[in-house]
Image (tube, rainbow, N blue to C red):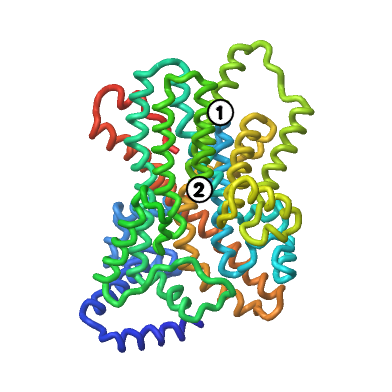
Amino acid sequence: MDITTYSAERETERSTNHYSPTNASLSTFRNGFWSLVRVFIPNLTSRRQRYARNTCPSTGLLNSPSSNTLRRRIGRILVPSFLAEDQRQEAQKIRPTDFLDGMRGYAAFAVYCCHFIMPTHPKAHMGYGGNDGIDDYWITQLPILRLIYSGHTCVCLFFVISGFAISLRPLELARKGSYSALLDNMTSAIFRRPCRLYIPCFTILGITFFLSICGAFDFAFALTKHWPFPSRPLRIPAVHPTMSLQFKDFFGQVFDWADPLNRKTKHIPYGVQLWTIPVELRCSLVSFLTIIALAKVRPYIRLVITAGIGVYFQLQRHPEATLFLAGSILAELHIERAEHDASNLFFRIPESRVQKLRATLLFLFGLFLASYPPHGAAKALFWGPFHWLAKLIVSDSADADLYFYQTIASTLLVYVANRSPSLQKLFTTQLAVYLGKISFSLYCVHQALINWFGYRTILLMWSFTGRDSLWEYEAGIVLTFIFQTILSIWVADIFWRLVDAPSVGLTKRIERACIGGSWANANIEKPL
């Protein structure tokens, strides 16, 4: 379906749906919005037109100092942070836990890759050789290679990293016996956690809703009636005939999604990838409660009890809580090792070759386990014995084997990277640091951009490359992926600077306004 055919069908649909004054106002709003966009994009005019406008006395308002200042500000906003002239690449000391940001950045990019390829590659999550020879022989289905688009594995890694990050400071205070400071810290963390998670999400949901009433997703929604791709689409915002119905749909979806105690995962069409955010909040509260309950317990007993609670949650099919508690355990082990190194400051031995080799092999094994396929594991190459073992240990219920291995793999990857300085270098490069900064923003914005530009760009590229042969089919997708990746990172960079980073300061100001007191300023940790 091309854009011309879609527009004709859209006009026919409006005429048959008794186009009301409300519909007319919605259409007027959309037309006015895009006209406003064209006005504020100066590059739409040629250099000669800009020169004539600057020299014409009647356009003095456009050349006023306030207008020039506004354009400079818009220009600074649109330029990515790594290209800004005022950015100085200063050498900063790498902290022991900075590798977590790099791991989170790579994982967020893999989630984006997963959502991009899912509609065009329906068997991507099938294990190699696991479908009786039907679309199960692609090299990208092999272990480790498949991690570039294994979104579910990366979500598990998110949970372990989050559990590590939110537990580190409280456990340090508990081990020092600073229980008063621990109470202050936990009060602040529990208060700030919902704000830190939900403010960027509500912002992107509001932007997505605004774009939906402007018609940004009309083309993608119309495609769902005659879907041109081999796999079903992720949920796309529905197009309603009136603005009131659009409002009702949006607020109803968001109201149900935001419930952290909802056992049923809510994939809302305005942000299908945001299903993890209420889960993050729920599991954060579980981790905080566990830390408070075990704050005065001896460290090794605390480790055993926390591990037992995590195993129980895993058997009860709450793997997300297990992953958070695994992060708490790794944080405690990190603190214990740091205390040991501090007490032997003059006898610290650098990482030997044997230790590097052992860490590399363990990390590769973790990557291998993380590659456990969601489908066809019983027949897939390498995975038959692992599938049998998982069914023997956990249960025969759906996805129990997948959660079992991904929980082990995510925990193992963070544990090994935390103990190996050589592996941490992989996650503290400039690319890893940058992806870590924009990871949450990229996670928030990528699906709306795929719905807006991705599908139509694939069809556009196929109109040039064709799609009859495998090479033509994949060439169109690769070209679209390059364009979509540049667009997604650019928009994520803007969202990070305008929404995500300022939300940290906004959360602090909300806390100070609501709580007050001198300790509210002294015990605010950097949010995740």
The residue depicted at 67 percent of the width and 55 percent of the height is: 146
x then y, percent, for residue 232? 53, 71
Res 28 quadrant in image: bottom left
Q: Earlier in the sequence, mark 1 or mark 2?
A: 1
Position of 91 relative to 85 (above/below):
above
x then y, percent, for residue 89? 55, 37
Q: How many marks?
A: 2
Quick check: can you spot residue 53? no
Q: Name the residue under label 1.
A: 95
The residue depicted at 32 percent of the width and 84 percent of the height is: 14
x then y, percent, for residue 440? 47, 47
Q: Mark 2 points at which residue?
A: 317
x then y, percent, for residue 219? 44, 75
Q: In which quarter of the image is the C terminus?
A: top left
Q: Which of 174 and 246 is in front in this view?
A: 174
Q: Indicate the amino acid at tag 1.
A: Arg
